[in-house]
Image (tube, grey):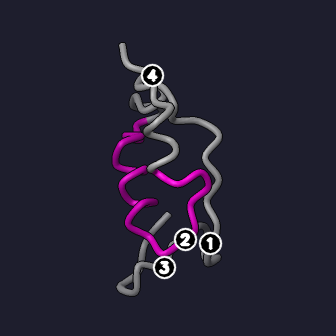
Amino acid sequence: MNIDSKNTLHVRGKEIGLVYFRTGYQINQYDCIGGVDGWKVRAALENSMAIKCPSIDVQLTTFKKY
């Protein structure tokens, strides 16, 4: 996954226009898994021009606190 200078998201050489989040409603879902920091991945996705579903506003309103 990388983001170019135009904030276009690329995965395996393909441009990605839509990102669907199936996870991320609980804080433990952002833990480091396989050496990848979930928070850095989420930040990169949010900074890209790809359309996010659900939007960060909607996802944070349903975020569970511990």
Q: From the image, which quarter does the C terminus lie in?
A: top left
Mark nearer the N terminus (1 vs 2):
1
Q: Specify whether residue 20 is painted magenta.
A: no
Q: CA distance from mark 2 to mark 4?
A: 25 Å
Q: CA distance from mark 1 to mark 3?
A: 7 Å
**Residue at the disc numbered 2:** 50
Of mark 4 and mark 3, the one earlier in the sequence is: 3
Q: Secondary structure at mark 2?
A: loop
The amino acid type, in three-letter code, at marker 2 is: Ala
Q: Which residues are magenta?
A: 35-56
- Cα gap from disc 4 to disc 3, whole angstroms: 30 Å
| Mark number, residue 1 | none
**Amino acid under disc 1:** Ile
Write down the residue under mark 4.
64
Mark 1 Cα within 10 Å, few/some/many (few <14, many 20+)? some
Distance from disc 1 to disc 2, alpha carbons, whole Å, reads: 6 Å
